[in-house]
Amino acid sequence: MFCTLCMYFEITCLFLLSGLHRLQFEGKTSFGMSVFNLGNAIMGSGILGLAYAMANTGVVLFLILLTVVAVLSSYSIHLLLKSSGIVGIRAYEQLGYRAFGTPGKMAAGIAITLQNIGAMSSYLYIVKYEFPLVIQAFLKVDKPAGEWYLNGNYLVIIVSIAVILPLALMKQLGYLGYTSGFSLSCMVFFLIAVIYKKFNVPCPFVDFALNATAGGLNVSATDPGGEDDPACIPKMANLNTQTAYTIPILAFAFVCHPEVLPIYTELRNPNKKKMQHVANISIAVMYIMYFLAALFGYLTFYGEVEAELLHTYSRIDPYDTLILCVRVAVLTAVTLTVPIVLFPVRRAIQQMMFPNKTFYWPRHIAIAFVLLTFINLLVIFAPNILGIFGVIGATSAPCLIFIFPAVFYIRIVPKEEEPLLSVPKFLAACFAGIGFLFMIMSLSFIIIDWTSGTNQASSGH
């Protein structure tokens, strides 16, 4: 297993080097590779929370919401590409500057910073909860007695100092980080494992401790009379206090918009129609993967599924070899993705606070150190990954997907080409309104859920 882990690190380093090399050749990326790169930008840790979202909405309602968010994401990319084509700008923050001057640039920079901080926090949260389980499984520790090396908070700090910080201190790492190709392969492995385990986990499942006490007896989904257990019947529609997190989780899972324009720049023989095809295919592929991961994760655990899907499997068998391999793969992927995501945050901070300053090593190192320290504190003291998905998904994600593309479009497209009351600009205004509505409703429901004292977001597993 450790040899496999070393191989993963080696492959990832190769991806890093090839990514740095490719950045020197703008405009030469093939259509297929562009689809792959944008798919990697879309795919993230959000996939781990989708089964929980389906459990709190039902299969049909979840599919409707997933479809709506995917279609709206595609439309917002259309708005970005149209605005970019008119002014010849292929950077999200610069579109904000072109539309609203410095306030627009600052707003876009802040939203991207929050979004990426949320992404990094969710990655390290996975390290916090999954890494101890991996070590525990390797050492065959059934009942931890408070060992420091099984404490997720300590492990997050160690991983941050030993792995993430050295990579984050590199002068160049590439805008998108082509290690995302490796991350995507890990997520495909995760999806295959989730589908496979659906047909190997009895329903209702028995917790590992109880199962061991009972001598490993299997529990079937039917009682002796042959009737289905009510706990093993999927719900087609479901509404409860946790349903409020569904749209933010979905929005979080589809955010790729800051990366769209750089990928457009690298596309061979670029034009708006071609890049829109790239976006549509990427979103369609991720849509299918998201739905399958959510569906089979939900059909494995039903109402018992947790906000972070992988964590639920340890309740069945913490020593399961397949799930252990999945954990190692996902842990490696998310750990090595954190420094990639940190780079655009640092660049956004430098553009907002030191716009005319040249590269300076002390500042470069200080920003990375402060960011990692802040994110570590957030992960250590945030009780649940759901809170990260919820808050970030309810704030920065609607801005990046809905609000900013629409208002930038309305401001940038000349009135001579499209009058303010034209159908395209009216649709863009409605689109921005939907974003504001999603943000206000989601935040309201989440705050109400937190203050009610009955949520899962405010309690640990």
Image: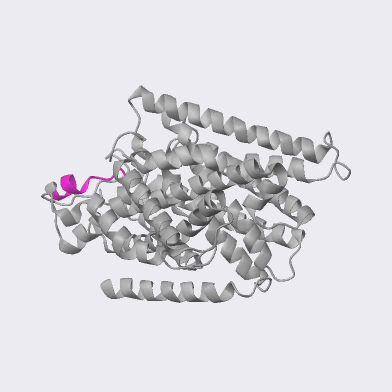
Spot occupied by residue 364 in the image (x, y as percentages of width and height): 44, 60
Q: Residue at x 61, y 47 (%)?
A: 70
Q: Residue at x 47, y 73 (%)?
A: 15
Report x, y in % for residue 72. 65, 44
Task: Decide: is 200 above or below 10.
Answer: above
Residue reaching furthest to the left: 145
Q: Is residue 19 magenta?
A: no
| x then y, percent, for residue 56 | 44, 35
Quadrant of the rendered structure where residue 91 is?
bottom right
Q: Nearer the viewer, residue 351 or 73?
A: 351
* Camera sees residue 10: yes
Please tell me whether residue 206 belongs to the stretch shown in magenta.
yes
Specify whether 128 is left or right of 437.
Answer: left
The image position of residue 279, as x and y in percent, is 65, 57
Q: Is residue 454 left or right of residue 98?
A: left
Q: Quadrant of the N terminus?
A: bottom left
Asked if residue 400 shows in the view, the reply is no
Is 434 situated left or right of 357 in this image? right
- Does 163 sit above or below residue 46? below
The stretch of residues the image draws in magenta is: 203-212
Q: Is residue 383 above or below residue 376?
A: above
Q: How many marks?
A: 0
